[in-house]
Amino acid sequence: MSATTEGKLRIGEVAELTGTTPRTIRYYEEIGLLRGSGREQGKHRSYTEADVERLREIVRLRSLLGLSLDELSRLLEAQAARADLRRKLQQTEQAGERRELLEQALGHIATQLELVRGRRNELENLEQELVEKRRKVRSALREPER
């Protein structure tokens, strides 16, 4: 990675590293999916390796699941909340508090599963439609020409 001063990256470098465009990165910032690490003196956006990794995860999930930006935002919010809960779990030894944190984690996992399962169901429906179309075409091929 070719970083600018102090390990900070400019938007063009981040776009190149993640296979996106500066415009996409700006839009993801605007809607709250990505938070840039700040601005350099010349008012240029600057990013860290953590920002690059988050953007890679956003791109991966969007591509893999084909989620809308709203759905993607919900998925990422649940993921971030779970990470926060993991940190809190490591800091507490009280059984009651640990149980509460674990129950909250289950809620976030349920949100993520709902989104993933919804996408899977849509893909399964598409698959069934294609299987049926293939069956019809194969059947038509077996019929003698009219």
Image (cartoon, helix red, strand yellow):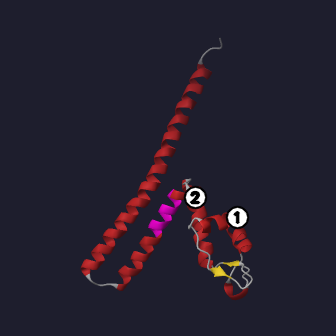
- The quarter holding residue 138 reads top right
Give the camera-side residue of 40 and 19. Answer: 40
x, y percentage for residue 109? Answer: 40, 63
- Label 1 to label 2: alpha-carbon separation: 16 Å
Helix, strand or loop status at disc 2: helix
Q: Residue at x 44, y 60 (%)?
A: 112
Q: Residue at x 41, y 60 (%)?
A: 111
Q: Is there any visible trace of residue 34 in the rendered image?
A: yes
Mark drawn on residue 62:
2
- The quarter holding residue 46 reads bottom right
Mark 1 or mark 2, earlier in chain? 1
Say whether residue 33 is left or right of residue 14: left
Give, as a three-letter code, the residue at label 2: Arg
Q: Is residue 141 above or below residue 122?
A: above
Give the main secondary structure, helix, strand or loop, of the magenta stretch. helix
Give the camera-side residue of 23 and 55. Answer: 23
Give, as a three-letter code, the residue at label 1: Arg
Mark drawn on residue 87:
none
Say whether residue 103 is left or right of residue 74: left
Q: Residue at x 72, y 77 (%)?
A: 10
Q: Is residue 7 above or below residue 138?
A: below
Total tally of numbered discs in the picture = 2
The residue furthest top is 146
Mark drawn on residue 23:
1
Give the camera-side residue of 109 and 135. Answer: 109
Label 2 neighbour load within 10 Å: few <14, some 14-19, many 20+: some
x, y percentage for residue 39? Answer: 67, 81
**What segment carries the magenta color?**
71-79
Say whether residue 62 is left or right of residue 102: right
Quadrant into which the C terminus falls = top right
Q: Is residue 78 above or below residue 88?
A: above
